[in-house]
Image (cartoon, helix red, strand yellow):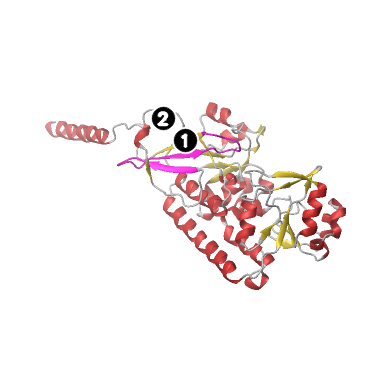
Amino acid sequence: MKRWIQLAVVALCAIVVAACGRKSVSLEDFDKPVYMLEYASGFDILSADGRQSVLVIVTNPWQGADGIAVQLFIARDGEQVPEGFDGQLLEGDAQRIVAMSSTHIAMLDAIGEVDRVVGVSGIDYISNPDIQARRDRIGDVGYEGNINYELLLSLDPDLVLLYGVNGASAMEGKLKELGIPFMYVGDYLEESPLGKAEWLVALSEVVGCRSEGEKVFAEIPVRYNALKQRVAENALDAPSVMLNMPYGDSWFMPSAGSYAVRLIEDAGGDYIYKKNTGNASTPVDMEEAYLLASAADMWLNVGMASTLGEVKAACPKFADTRCFLNGDVYNNNACTNAAGGNDYFESAVVHPDLLLRDLVKIFHPELVEEPFVYYKRLK
């Protein structure tokens, strides 16, 4: 009997010691970056001394957001939530994920963790082969404004990956009501091609594989910058580049600092519309668009068109431009599935080096031997 009492006392002391070692901390203690961003600007991963748990802070996760910070606390090793925290709580690493954007799937696939995806939005438009191979076991929860919450709840997700467009996701309130944690992924807001790809590190954190995410990402800038340097050292000219197709009565031209334009410049091209120095696309009328296209050497990203005939049908007047007559019209829909899902908007986010290579092949074909991945020349 005495022996059992001694054992009970020892066990109680161990519990007390462990509890003391895990005393509560404040939110302010989580101020130590566990990963230093190189290119992205929309997230931070912070920890506190002696803690396994981390705080993921996503900043301004939708267009027009100003001073917005959405926090996710990942509690590990039985550690308590910091005092003063009122954000989203994920107990341990996410094993079951609902991804509301196909780019989330591409990021998880890049680190070998796509099997954690149990729910998606619009499965027919997703290109990822693993998702399509498991489509009978993956729930398609629908689109914002028409979410099947009964199905989503039945999937028992640990985490829902969201995105915002012009404001917070309409799913936020219902997810809070259901007690399902969520995290915003703001990759599409990054203007840097490498910044977009760096978001895979944030997703690797939520699945407990940050070291793998860091390793995967570290190799992407090496390949990207090596090709960028090759172009800078060897390209003799910079062909002028027109972008996009009309939308209604307007033609939207990207900012000179946008993602698409940065890729063009890094690939040795010259974006033809430099007047837009803002942070969003700006509309020009059809006459100005025609003058721009007439002066351009190349015409890229022509909507849904797969042939020159389709481009001509959409923009008859533009069929007499030099780039059209020379057949220098390229589109980023080389990897499109039967439903119209375009892998350019999915996996290209984690393969900016391949996207850059495609553009170099268009502008300076003598520098690239590999076949196109995302782009094709229209005929």
On the picture, is 185 further left or further right than 21? right
Q: Is residue 318 magenta?
A: no
Is residue 175 or residue 247 the one in the foreground? 247
On the picture, is 30 further left or further right than 360? left
Tag 2 residue: 85
Q: Position of residue 371 (x, y in %)?
A: 66, 68
**Which quadrant of the rendered structure holds the C terminus?**
bottom right
Which residue occupies 64% across, 54% down? 261
On the picture, is 375 further left or further right than 293? left
What amino acid is labelled 1 in the image? Gln
| Secondary structure under the numbered disc 2 in the rendered image | loop
| Secondary structure under the numbered disc 1 in the rendered image | strand
Tag 1 residue: 71
Establish if 143 lies above or below 349.
Answer: above
**Which quadrant of the rendered structure holds the N terminus?**
top left
Q: Position of residue 88 (x, y in %)?
A: 47, 33
Magenta span covers which residues? Answer: 43-68
